[in-house]
Image (cartoon, coloured by chain):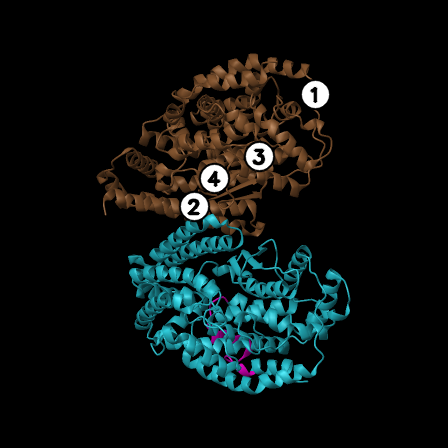
Chain colours: A brown, B cyan
Amino acid sequence: MSAYDRLKARFARIATLGEAQGMLHWDAAAVMPPGGGAARGEQLATLSGLAHELLTAPEVAADLAEAEAAGDWDSANLALMRAAHRRATALPVALVEASARANAACEQLWRVARERSDFAMVAPALAEVVRLQRESAAALAAATGLSPYDALMDSFQRGIRAADVEPIFAAYERFLADALPRAEAIQAARPAPVPLPGPFPVPAQQALCREMAERVGLDFAHARLDESTHPFCGGTPTDVRITTRYDTASVAQALLGVLHETGHALYERGLPEAFARQPVGEAAGMAAHESQSLIIEMQACRSNAFLRFAGPRLHATFGGDPAPYTPANLAGLWRRVERGFIRVDADELTYPAHVILRFRLERALIEGKLAVADLPGAWNEGFQRLLGLSPPDDRRGCLQDIHWYDGAFGYFPSYTLGAMAAAQLMRAARASLPGLDHALEHGDFTPLRDWLRLKVHGQGARLGFQDLLRAATAKPLDPADFTAHLTERYLID
Amino acid sequence: MSAYDRLKARFARIATLGEAQGMLHWDAAAVMPPGGGAARGEQLATLSGLAHELLTAPEVAADLAEAEAAGDWDSANLALMRAAHRRATALPVALVEASARANAACEQLWRVARERSDFAMVAPALAEVVRLQRESAAALAAATGLSPYDALMDSFQRGIRAADVEPIFAAYERFLADALPRAEAIQAARPAPVPLPGPFPVPAQQALCREMAERVGLDFAHARLDESTHPFCGGTPTDVRITTRYDTASVAQALLGVLHETGHALYERGLPEAFARQPVGEAAGMAAHESQSLIIEMQACRSNAFLRFAGPRLHATFGGDPAPYTPANLAGLWRRVERGFIRVDADELTYPAHVILRFRLERALIEGKLAVADLPGAWNEGFQRLLGLSPPDDRRGCLQDIHWYDGAFGYFPSYTLGAMAAAQLMRAARASLPGLDHALEHGDFTPLRDWLRLKVHGQGARLGFQDLLRAATAKPLDPADFTAHLTERYLID
């Protein structure tokens, strides 16, 4: 067996442990009784530890040095193996374990602190998390030649640097300063949308969500739809598990949430089978992943074309007055621009402002330019500058997201890079598929799905984020497609 | 860290991998979409392989040789570690893998062959399974000093030998030859029981099953109740997962099935926490486990005392004519003796005959005294002798159970040893708890549960099957308690 074949077998084993972890994570979020939590923590930690041992075993370095791979896919696979090994061996086991403990302790405290809107309560734990993240970032930086913050960001989306993100975000900030008041004025001049009458019985919502997910392209022989407090897409490529939550007063939350997770699920389902359980057979990163959820949820399913399909379909399910189900009224409800404090509730125009704020603050924390104690003040000041609002408390400010309190620094930019990539991909798809909107108007996602499978899903991690966009759209990330999309959707009366 | 502490850490890791496997097995049976099957097989095989590597790593033998443990529990733990290591290292990896492949292939074929009642179709695959089982048995025998069949049986129930089982089963065969016609005559002389009216809506059955499981002692903060084709108890001690199946025409199947699985679940829940994830903290074996399901289902829940509680409770749930819900009528329905071909449908009087037949046949197969080709004939002949019936086809004969076709030889005796132990334990419990039946009559399982937790569950695997019974009942397995129970229940008019 060649060194490369030995490595493939080893990485398949590591990926299979990751699959088991994926299922156990899903179970914990969707169905586990509360008393199972402690044992589940042990199970996940044991699987992580074994995967880390497999990746850092002494013989791996020799195999990586000796291995040769021919062809695009195998060359990329070997390069990804080397990168994974470099990152894994850069971090001392003691640091990994200290981080895991600090993250878990901080996250527990954060749940209470957020509830009480008491930042001081969690500040020391967060300071410890940040201290260890800085240490990890420094170690990764030394191993990769990146800056510390870039080294963290690279673990979520390979190949993206703060130097790429900074000008893009600065330009968006300028765009938004002009666009937001204009969008608000246009919106205010229109009649207020009429709420859908409801109530929306949960079984009917479940059936509708399932039908819509199938329509978008999810095959329930390889998927489940369940409920959890925080919707997510988990599981494995041949057994994806998406979740949502239901509110009998509103169908938008569950339905649009399911469409979003279906976008993630289609990516996993469409990954190249020939490289299943190999690094190159995985998704290309978190920004790429978010582009796939958002192209379904934001680009396709909030398009005028799809709303013409969705309106009658929803009315047929829930009955009552048909008037609120017109495409124009649905657009008024589901494409409403509104400055708010909470990222996850934000519309697509203001959402990047939430991300820009976090990017700047987390970078400053990692670079030692911002102290944890000063975070609430910096948050509120930045929020005021970006969106003109002052958070009334830290619960609606710097305590709202789990990410930092769980040790995830460098993740936030992926949300907005993904939104931008989604707009760029949609534009390219429309250009090469003239019947795309006509199909969406009939609830037919086949053309879009086939295009995404070819251009994105089936590419796995062979290409980095920028190269993936280059191959699919003939240019690297170009935020102009996103602002053009927003302009057309929100700024033209 | 001492050698024993190193071993404890290693066995905890192995057990945690087993927990992960337990959850993935549950998932596969209860909720997995069909398309997830192939990946699940990989996940389970990878976890098994890693557990085997951890158990057979070169440093384990040295630690086991060096380790010292003080006190009953730790001494027993170390002895169990040594036994597990001896068994694991006795089997060449190539043989383990060949067996796993042969079992999986045979089991797949068996599903079709059973459906078509076509033994010839699966016979070559079964012959290969038997060949490999004989090879494994020989290797285990060489390592343990046991006979080949005993070495297999020992992996399901430590410390039980064919030489113990044989006279017990021979005596039961003689008992049954006299008891069965008498029980049938007594039953025939009574008025036929009236079926419960039904229908039994599934949601009402689910709520009732859950309530009854809680009443027996299952805490749903640490448990789930779901549906699967074949009811089972899985999961982990702090997160047990029981399943059942519902039939709107009958409540007995779901309810008695849940009570049976609840008995298994209580055992897992009551294992000694101080030795969680250690060999000595596990259940004492499959016969011990079956004694706990049967003491709940057969001994307690089909007792006259509990039927007096269950009747009104069921009538309150399902309504209709109250007459069929009398304890006497429920007894007529749920304690009906009937010769039949199918083991899993058998009553407690004839059930051992099904087991005795399988014990004799599987032992002959392993000892090379019976060829696979001759199995159907030997089955039908033995069945005729034990129960006076001739199976009309192999589907209702030697094709009915999955065990052999999946490579499980030496398991069957556990069912009847467990039934006998259940009777013996119930008798001892009644002797030391004079209020036991009074409590059951009020749906109160506390006295029985507390006694079982003390005498059985909390003992873990510290004692072998016979010593566990000795400590709890002051004698080793004594089938007279079982025949006394059957005599009282079925042979006294």
Contact between marks 1 and 4 (CB within 8 A): the answer is no
Q: Position of residue A355 (x, y in %)?
A: 51, 24
SS state under label 4: helix
| Chain of the residue where label 2 is placed in the rendered structure | A
SS state under label 3: helix
How far is mark 1 from mark 4, CA to CA? 48 Å
Q: Which residue is mark 1?
A: A192
| Chain of the residue where label 4 is placed in the rendered structure | A
Q: Is residue B350 magenta?
A: no
Q: Amino acid at mark 3?
A: Gly
Residue A68 in the figure: left or right of residue B330:
left
Residue at horizontal 64 percent and vertical 13 percent from the top: A185
Label 4 vs 2, first from the N-terminus? 2
Residue A19: mark: 2
How far is mark 3 from mark 1, CA to CA? 24 Å
Per the rendered image, the range of residues in magenta is: B460-480
Q: Amino acid at mark 4?
A: Ala
SS state under label 1: loop
Task: Name the image quarter holding residue B361.
Answer: bottom left
